[in-house]
Amino acid sequence: MLDTVVSSSYQKVMEKALGTSALRNQVISNNIANVNTPGFKRSDVEFEGVLAQALEKKNKLSLTSTNVQHFAGNGGTIGTTPTIFTSSENTMRIDGNNVDIDAEMANIAKNTIYYNAIAHQLSRYFSNLKSAIREGK
């Protein structure tokens, strides 16, 4: 039973990471779309740092009970949410825009690799569950 709870937490973290990566892709795409907009300030998504702080604080993920017969956990669900922030870094451009197209293209490539890695890990997790279910029959 404990393994199922821990695995469920793993799945939730991976799902959050996928959702965050999708959000980051939208934010980076918005930066790229506004590369020539005067005064536009680039945005980014913070999640990994927030997750690391939450894990360090609690030392493990929290559990949620949806039925009174469930074992007691250590409270709540994963309370980390991605945060979109606007960069305040200075710009070398006269129009006040601080989007560097080369950096944004590198960021979108990095995010794509990250998304694919998380999706692959989640796929392996489900394959292992499927295999365990077959072996248990």
Image (spheres, grey):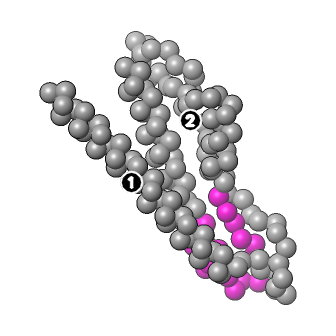
Q: Residue 78 carries which label?
A: 2
Residue at point 38% right, 27% down? 4
Residue flagged by tag 2: what amino acid is it? Ile
Q: Which mark is nearer the camera, 2 or 1?
A: 1
Q: Quadrant of residue 136?
A: top left
On screen, residue 78 above or below 19: above
- Magenta span has 55? no
Residue at point 49% right, 66% down? 112
Residue flagged by tag 1: what amino acid is it? His
Q: Cβ–Cβ below 8 Å for labels 2 and 1? A: no
Q: Position of residue 79 (x, y in %)?
A: 60, 36
Labels 2 and 1: the sequence-earlier one: 2
The region drawn magenta spans 26-45
Q: Position of residue 93 (x, y in %)?
A: 82, 85
Q: Which residue lies furthest to the top in this view?
A: 69
Q: Which mark is residue 120?
A: 1
On screen, residue 78 above or below 118: above
Residue in the foreground of this view, choosing between 63 and 114: 114
Spatial CA distance of label 2 from label 1 is 21 Å
SS for dot 2: loop
Q: Which residue lies furthest to the left in this view?
A: 137
SS for dot 1: helix
- Relative placement, left or right, of 88 versus 42 is right
- Magenta span has 34? yes
